[in-house]
Amino acid sequence: MPCRSTPFQTLALACALLFSVAPKAAPKPLSDAEMSSVRGADGSILAGLASSSSSQNPFTSGLAAAFSSSSGATLLTPAQFASALEAVNLAPTMFADYQGQPVAQTVVDAKPVTFSFNISDVLQATTGLQSNVGASMGTITIKDFDARGTTLWVWHH
Protein backbone atom coordinates (compact mmCIF):
# COMPACT_ATOMS: atom_id res chain seq x y z
CA MET A 1 0.00 0.00 0.00
CA PRO A 2 1.47 3.39 -0.94
CA CYS A 3 2.37 5.77 1.84
CA ARG A 4 0.38 9.02 1.76
CA SER A 5 1.55 12.36 3.10
CA THR A 6 0.27 13.67 6.42
CA PRO A 7 -1.59 16.65 4.84
CA PHE A 8 -3.34 14.25 2.42
CA GLN A 9 -4.32 11.93 5.29
CA THR A 10 -5.65 14.91 7.28
CA LEU A 11 -7.69 16.12 4.28
CA ALA A 12 -9.07 12.62 3.69
CA LEU A 13 -10.04 12.32 7.36
CA ALA A 14 -11.72 15.76 7.30
CA CYS A 15 -13.72 14.79 4.17
CA ALA A 16 -14.75 11.50 5.72
CA LEU A 17 -15.95 13.26 8.87
CA LEU A 18 -17.79 15.90 6.83
CA PHE A 19 -19.71 13.33 4.79
CA SER A 20 -20.41 10.99 7.68
CA VAL A 21 -22.11 13.50 9.97
CA ALA A 22 -25.90 13.02 9.79
CA PRO A 23 -27.43 11.25 6.84
CA LYS A 24 -29.57 13.59 4.82
CA ALA A 25 -32.08 10.85 3.93
CA ALA A 26 -32.81 9.52 7.38
CA PRO A 27 -36.09 7.59 7.55
CA LYS A 28 -39.00 9.33 9.23
CA PRO A 29 -42.56 8.23 9.87
CA LEU A 30 -45.15 9.53 7.40
CA SER A 31 -48.38 11.21 8.40
CA ASP A 32 -51.74 9.72 7.36
CA ALA A 33 -52.06 12.28 4.56
CA GLU A 34 -48.57 11.41 3.26
CA MET A 35 -49.30 7.67 3.46
CA SER A 36 -52.53 7.98 1.49
CA SER A 37 -50.74 9.82 -1.29
CA VAL A 38 -47.75 7.47 -1.48
CA ARG A 39 -49.22 4.66 -3.49
CA GLY A 40 -52.62 3.88 -4.89
CA ALA A 41 -53.99 7.40 -5.24
CA ASP A 42 -52.28 7.61 -8.62
CA GLY A 43 -53.90 4.36 -9.80
CA SER A 44 -50.67 2.40 -9.54
CA ILE A 45 -52.37 -0.29 -7.43
CA LEU A 46 -55.41 -1.71 -9.14
CA ALA A 47 -57.51 -4.67 -8.10
CA GLY A 48 -58.36 -5.33 -11.74
CA LEU A 49 -61.91 -6.42 -10.96
CA ALA A 50 -63.75 -3.58 -12.63
CA SER A 51 -62.41 -4.31 -16.09
CA SER A 52 -63.39 -7.17 -18.34
CA SER A 53 -60.29 -6.85 -20.48
CA SER A 54 -58.65 -9.97 -21.79
CA SER A 55 -55.29 -8.72 -20.46
CA GLN A 56 -56.22 -9.69 -16.91
CA ASN A 57 -54.29 -12.52 -15.34
CA PRO A 58 -56.04 -15.72 -14.14
CA PHE A 59 -56.30 -14.41 -10.57
CA THR A 60 -58.16 -11.21 -11.42
CA SER A 61 -60.23 -12.94 -14.11
CA GLY A 62 -61.32 -15.61 -11.62
CA LEU A 63 -62.24 -13.06 -8.95
CA ALA A 64 -64.07 -10.92 -11.50
CA ALA A 65 -66.12 -13.94 -12.56
CA ALA A 66 -66.82 -14.97 -8.96
CA PHE A 67 -67.95 -11.50 -7.86
CA SER A 68 -69.95 -10.49 -10.93
CA SER A 69 -73.56 -9.40 -11.01
CA SER A 70 -76.02 -9.68 -13.86
CA SER A 71 -77.79 -6.50 -12.72
CA GLY A 72 -74.67 -4.35 -12.20
CA ALA A 73 -74.18 -1.76 -9.48
CA THR A 74 -76.82 0.50 -7.95
CA LEU A 75 -75.84 3.98 -6.82
CA LEU A 76 -76.98 4.62 -3.24
CA THR A 77 -77.35 8.01 -1.60
CA PRO A 78 -75.75 8.39 1.84
CA ALA A 79 -79.18 7.87 3.46
CA GLN A 80 -79.82 4.71 1.43
CA PHE A 81 -76.36 3.41 2.33
CA ALA A 82 -77.03 4.06 6.03
CA SER A 83 -80.33 2.13 5.72
CA ALA A 84 -78.57 -0.78 3.96
CA LEU A 85 -75.96 -0.92 6.71
CA GLU A 86 -78.60 -0.69 9.44
CA ALA A 87 -80.33 -3.74 7.93
CA VAL A 88 -77.19 -5.79 8.66
CA ASN A 89 -76.50 -4.21 12.07
CA LEU A 90 -73.71 -1.91 10.88
CA ALA A 91 -73.31 1.87 10.83
CA PRO A 92 -71.45 4.18 8.42
CA THR A 93 -69.34 5.39 11.36
CA MET A 94 -67.70 1.93 11.45
CA PHE A 95 -65.86 2.84 8.24
CA ALA A 96 -63.22 5.46 9.05
CA ASP A 97 -62.79 6.56 5.42
CA TYR A 98 -66.51 6.93 4.64
CA GLN A 99 -67.39 10.62 4.57
CA GLY A 100 -70.99 10.70 3.32
CA GLN A 101 -70.35 10.21 -0.38
CA PRO A 102 -72.60 8.14 -2.73
CA VAL A 103 -71.93 4.39 -2.66
CA ALA A 104 -72.09 1.83 -5.47
CA GLN A 105 -73.80 -1.34 -4.24
CA THR A 106 -73.43 -4.63 -6.10
CA VAL A 107 -75.16 -7.85 -5.09
CA VAL A 108 -73.25 -10.87 -6.44
CA ASP A 109 -75.35 -13.42 -8.31
CA ALA A 110 -72.66 -15.26 -10.31
CA LYS A 111 -72.70 -19.05 -10.50
CA PRO A 112 -69.93 -20.85 -8.59
CA VAL A 113 -66.62 -20.70 -10.45
CA THR A 114 -63.46 -22.79 -10.52
CA PHE A 115 -60.18 -21.11 -11.42
CA SER A 116 -56.44 -21.63 -11.03
CA PHE A 117 -53.74 -19.03 -10.68
CA ASN A 118 -50.05 -18.75 -9.89
CA ILE A 119 -48.90 -16.81 -6.81
CA SER A 120 -47.09 -14.41 -9.16
CA ASP A 121 -50.55 -13.52 -10.57
CA VAL A 122 -51.55 -12.31 -7.10
CA LEU A 123 -48.38 -10.20 -6.82
CA GLN A 124 -49.00 -8.68 -10.23
CA ALA A 125 -52.67 -7.93 -9.50
CA THR A 126 -52.08 -6.35 -6.09
CA THR A 127 -48.78 -4.52 -6.62
CA GLY A 128 -48.32 -4.28 -10.37
CA LEU A 129 -44.97 -6.07 -10.07
CA GLN A 130 -44.04 -8.55 -12.76
CA SER A 131 -42.45 -11.80 -11.70
CA ASN A 132 -39.67 -12.57 -14.15
CA VAL A 133 -38.31 -15.62 -12.39
CA GLY A 134 -38.30 -18.89 -14.25
CA ALA A 135 -39.34 -21.03 -11.29
CA SER A 136 -43.01 -21.25 -10.37
CA MET A 137 -44.11 -19.63 -7.14
CA GLY A 138 -46.86 -22.20 -6.78
CA THR A 139 -50.32 -22.70 -8.26
CA ILE A 140 -53.59 -22.48 -6.37
CA THR A 141 -56.90 -23.86 -7.62
CA ILE A 142 -60.16 -22.66 -6.16
CA LYS A 143 -62.97 -25.08 -6.91
CA ASP A 144 -66.64 -24.10 -7.00
CA PHE A 145 -66.14 -20.74 -5.28
CA ASP A 146 -69.64 -19.44 -4.53
CA ALA A 147 -70.02 -15.74 -3.62
CA ARG A 148 -73.75 -15.48 -4.43
CA GLY A 149 -75.58 -13.14 -2.08
CA THR A 150 -72.45 -11.16 -1.20
CA THR A 151 -73.06 -7.41 -1.14
CA LEU A 152 -70.20 -5.17 -2.22
CA TRP A 153 -70.14 -1.46 -1.32
CA VAL A 154 -67.65 0.80 -3.08
CA TRP A 155 -67.04 4.52 -2.59
CA HIS A 156 -64.26 6.90 -3.57
CA HIS A 157 -61.88 7.86 -0.80
Image (cartoon, grey):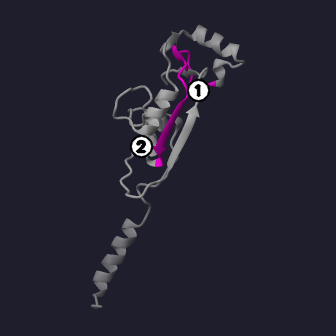
Residue 59 counted in the magenta span: no
Quadrant housing residue 87: top right
**Which of the pair 101/25 is nearer the observer?**
101
Q: Secondary structure at mark 1?
A: loop
Tell me the magenta residue range: 95-119
> Which residue is denoted by mark 1 in the rendering?
147
**Which of the pair 12/46 is nearer the observer?**
46
User: Where's residue 65, x and y in %?
Assistant: 47, 28
Camera-nearest label, 1 or 2: 1
User: Where's residue 134, x and y in %?
Assistant: 37, 58
What residue sits 45% from the left and 35% below the top? 60
> Which residue is denoted by mark 2 in the rendering?
124
Q: Which of pointers 1 and 2 lies earlier in the amino acid sequence?
A: 2
Q: Which image quadrant: the N terminus?
A: bottom left
Question: As drawn, is 56 to the left or to the right of 29?
Answer: left
Residue 47 visible? The answer is no
Residue 126 visible? The answer is yes
Assess disc 2: are there few (<14), some (14-19) or many (≥20) residues with their C-alpha within 10 Å of its C-alpha. some
Say which amino acid is labelled 2. Answer: Gln
What residue sits 32% from the left and 77% below the top? 12
Assess disc 1: are there few (<14), some (14-19) or many (≥20) residues with their C-alpha within 10 Å of its C-alpha. some
Count of marks, rendered view? 2
Q: In the displayed structure, would residue 19 be above or below residue 100?
A: below
C-alpha separation, residue under disc 1 versus residue under disc 2: 23 Å
User: Where's residue 40, x and y in %?
Assistant: 43, 35
Q: In the displayed structure, would residue 142 be above or below residue 15?
A: above
Say which amino acid is labelled 1. Answer: Ala
User: Where's residue 101, x and y in %?
Assistant: 52, 15
